[in-house]
Amino acid sequence: MTAKDKFHDAVKNALIKEGWMITNDPLFIQFGGVDLYVDLGAEKMLAAEKDNQKIAVEIKSFLGDSTISEFHQALGQLLNYRLILRRQDDYI
């Protein structure tokens, strides 16, 4: 499991303030024998649709020496998480 980003708590608090319930901190997903940890899992009840909406949140600050390198790493994580979560019923 990786360390929390500098802005982890601020993002978490903002989600809570907007009515999201944090369900996982971090969100653990497994795919093909690989363990992955997304920073936050959250859900929100939508009154109009009477259905749960779920999100996975990966928090990045890009404070390192190479912004472009950090961007490429974050993009790779996004693509991996999106592929995996689309294959899981709870996060479609």
Image (cartoon, grey):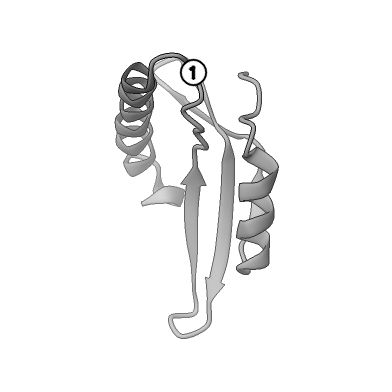
- Judged from this view, the residue extending furthest toward the bottom is 48
Location of residue 14 with respect to 9 vertically, above or below: below
Please indicate whether residue 11 sits to the left or right of residue 59 in the image. right
Q: Nearer the viewer, residue 52 or 26?
A: 26
In the displayed structure, does residue 8 sit left or right of residue 37?
A: right
Residue 53 in the image: state x and y as whole percent.
47, 63
Q: Compared to 71, does 83 lie above or below? A: below
**Left or right: 27 in relation to 31:** right
Q: Nearer the viewer, residue 16 or 50?
A: 16
Q: Residue at x 34, y 26 (%)?
A: 71
Q: How many marks?
A: 1
Query: Measured along the vertical axis of the image, is residue 39 above or below residue 2?
Result: below
Which quarter of the figure has residue 25?
A: top right
Foreground residue, 70 or 21?
Answer: 70
User: In x, y percent, where is residue 79?
Assistant: 29, 31
Q: Position of residue 60 (x, y in %)?
A: 49, 33
User: Could you say whether the residue bearing mark 1 is in a helix, strand or loop?
Assistant: loop
Q: Which residue is mark 1?
A: 64
Residue type, numbered disc 1 = Gly
The picture places residue 35, in percent across and down from the top left corner, at: 51, 19
Q: Residue at x 33, y 28 (%)?
A: 80
Quadrant showing the N terminus: top right
Determine the residue positioned at 61% across, 58% down: 15
Q: Is the residue marked by circle 1 packed among few (<14), some (14-19), or many (20+) residues within 10 Å?
A: few
